Amino acid sequence: MVTKVVPVNNFTGEEWREVKLLSLTAQQRRLVDAAKEALQRAYNPYSGFSVGAALRTGKGIVLGTNVENAAYGSSICAERSALVSANAQGLGDSCTAIAIVIRGASGISTADVSAPCGECRQFLWEFAVRSGVRERFEVILATHDLSQVVVTNIGYLLPRAFGPSDLEEEPRA
């Protein structure tokens, strides 16, 4: 019996790159700045953890924030907030990148970036498939003070993602 090793994805291992803020492209920087602006509108009276997201679409930037709720399961992350908003605006099939900026409790900047939760990664994948960018959907992570910035992609964050092809059908328009 021959065992075939199948790579998890087609990436080089450079898909989690810590970068200096100044090395971002102008387009990436606008996305980070917009996410930082959105961060100010996060509603988080329970955890104090703020998240702002800025989603690049074919028609511009769509913002999202985390919104907590006393019924914890009803809370929504900033990433999904931005994606749902883009979808409501008819932009769900033109999403190509997202920047996510975080701030810890009491307004204190965290020491490191935070990657999207599993549910958000799955949501990002669904929109990446719809938009045709798939694994190349860019994800930029940053701390509030912008001392830590990481550029990655959804293919790295969610290898071998479950999606429409697993259901043997493409999503209906």
Image (cartoon, helix red, strand yellow):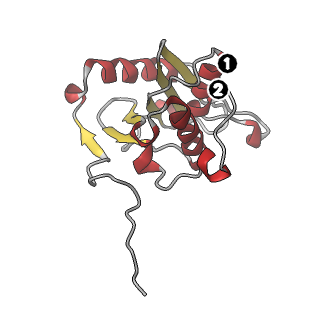
Q: Position of residue 166 (x, y in %)?
A: 62, 53
Residue 150 vertical position relative to residue 99 in the rendered view, above or below: below
Q: Residue 126 in the image: x percent, y percent?
A: 58, 39
Task: Identify whether 148 is placed above or below 64.
Answer: below
Amino acid at dot 1: Ala
Query: Which amino acid lies under the numbered mark 2 shown in the image of this protein?
Result: Val
Quarter holding residue 99: top left
- Up-down: is 91 above or below 68? above
Q: Which image quarter is the C terminus in? A: top right
Residue drawn at (25%, 29%), measured in percent from left and top?
21
- Tell me if mark 2 has few (under 14), some (14-19) or many (20+) residues whose alpha carbon lies within 10 angstroms of its own: some
Q: Residue at x 24, y 37 (%)?
A: 19
Whole-percent x and y of residue 26? 27, 18
Residue at the far top in the pictured view:
59
Can residue 167 be seen in this snapshot? yes
**Who's the residue at 60% across and 48% down the image?**
165
Quadrant of the frame with the N terminus: bottom left
Q: Which residue is mark 2?
A: 84
- Marks 2 and 1 close (CB-CB < 8 Å): yes
Report how far apart the C-alphas of labels 2 and 1 lie in the structure. Answer: 6 Å
- Residue under the image location 50 percent in, 27 percent down: 53
* Residue where numbered disc 1 is placed: 88
Q: Residue furthest bottom?
A: 1
Report which quarter residue 49 is drawn in: top right
Return the x and y of residue 117 as percentages of the image width and height: 55, 46
Q: Nearer the viewer, residue 33 or 24?
A: 24
Q: Which mark is residue 142?
A: none
- Around disc 1, counting alpha carbons within 10 Å, would you say few (fewer than 14), some (14 to 19), or many (20 or more)? few
Secondary structure of the residue carrying tag 1 is: helix
> Is residue 163 something that shows in the picture?
no
